Amino acid sequence: MLLSKNYDLIIIGGGPIGLSCGVEAEKNGLSYLILEKGVLVNALYNFPEQMTFFSTSNLLEIGGVPFISHTDKPTRKEALEYYRRVQESWNLTIKLYTEVTAMHSEENGYRIHTTKGDTFTKAVVVCTGFYDTPRLLNVPGEELPKVRHFYNSPHPYIGQKILVVGAANSACDVALETYYKGAEVTMAIRKSEIYPKTKYWIKPNIENRIKEGSIKAYFDSTVTHIKEDTVVIQTPEGIVEVANDFVLAMVGYMPNYALFEKLALPIANDAYKTPIHDTKTLETPLKNVYVAGVINAGLQTSTLFIENTREHAAIILQDIVSKL
């Protein structure tokens, strides 16, 4: 088996917070391994090609490695290169393309099962983010290949009839980018307006495109059925069926609760399905198992980001070192 060594710490998730936990483990001389099911900083890799972060580069820094970008707000490409340099600078121990499938309690620790073998660890940090688990529309036809929950580039949609579902930053970005590249864009918006907290440079643009009729928008409306060549939308005026080539469901993402169940992580029985944890140490009810990063807010995905969870790594490692 590819994983046979025992570790002081296993870190599940190779995003910025997982790397930060690795840096703190290095500082404290612990044996550790970061397990990532995809590529390095997998969620960032799956962001749109032309994405620009809302945060400034200094707020995305980890491990004391300076993040220098060409402008105040870095691009996806710059972020991918930066976190690669962090991994390289600290020589972080990480296994990519290694998905965790289960975790079982054993004496003095846990047995971690992965697609490339299993290993034993005394402590675990789960920091898997949420971007790779989309919220679903849960309507007939969502399984069709023309339905996309992730967006990379406007190029595939040139000359196509697009339905964008949603009204926050991602949906508005997608609607505008595809429109400017020649797509015929329609939006299905559950509320009566564009999300009020949409980025200040995007909101007036999308509102003006809707007002002038360049982008058709159905407000107070929901998608009820997706068909091969059309989409059915429930609007205040009744049912509307519009011709359609692609549906881009930009309605948000959520933590990977299927993985949490495999790990037996306790989840609060509240509206936000928050992983139960001590707010001071970030330890869960499972001894020496911690949660870090944006998953700590559960379904409240607009409250935690890289910049306000970077300190999680130091908090967790301080608690682990005091015990080990």
Image (tube, rainbow, N blue to C red):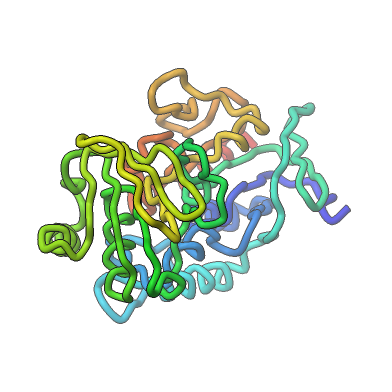
User: Who is closer to the viewer here, 237 or 221?
Assistant: 237
| Residue at x 39% of width, y 28% of height | 272
Q: Is residue 128 left or right of residue 34?
A: left
Establish if 57 lies above or below 265: below
Residue 6 percent location from the top left of the image:
79, 46
| Residue at x 20% of width, y 46% of height | 195
User: Who is closer to the viewer here, 120 or 50?
Assistant: 50
- In the rendered image, the residue lying farthest to the bottom is 70
Which corner quadrant holds the C terminus? top right
Q: Is residue 104 left or right of residue 205?
A: right
Residue 241 in sight here: yes
| Residue at x 58% of width, y 42% of height | 125
Residue 58 in sight here: no
- In the rendered image, the residue lying farthest to the right is 1
Residue 91 percent location from the top left of the image:
62, 68
| Residue at x 49% of width, y 40% of height | 255
Instruction: Count all numbered tags in the image, as a single digit.
Output: 0
Establish if 239 lies above or below 128: above
Q: Is residue 226 left or right of residue 320?
A: left
Residue 7 percent location from the top left of the image:
73, 47
- In the rendered image, the residue lying farthest to the top is 269
Establish if 50 lies above or below 27: below
Residue 121 percent location from the top left of the image:
73, 41
User: Who is closer to the viewer here, 162 or 61?
Assistant: 162
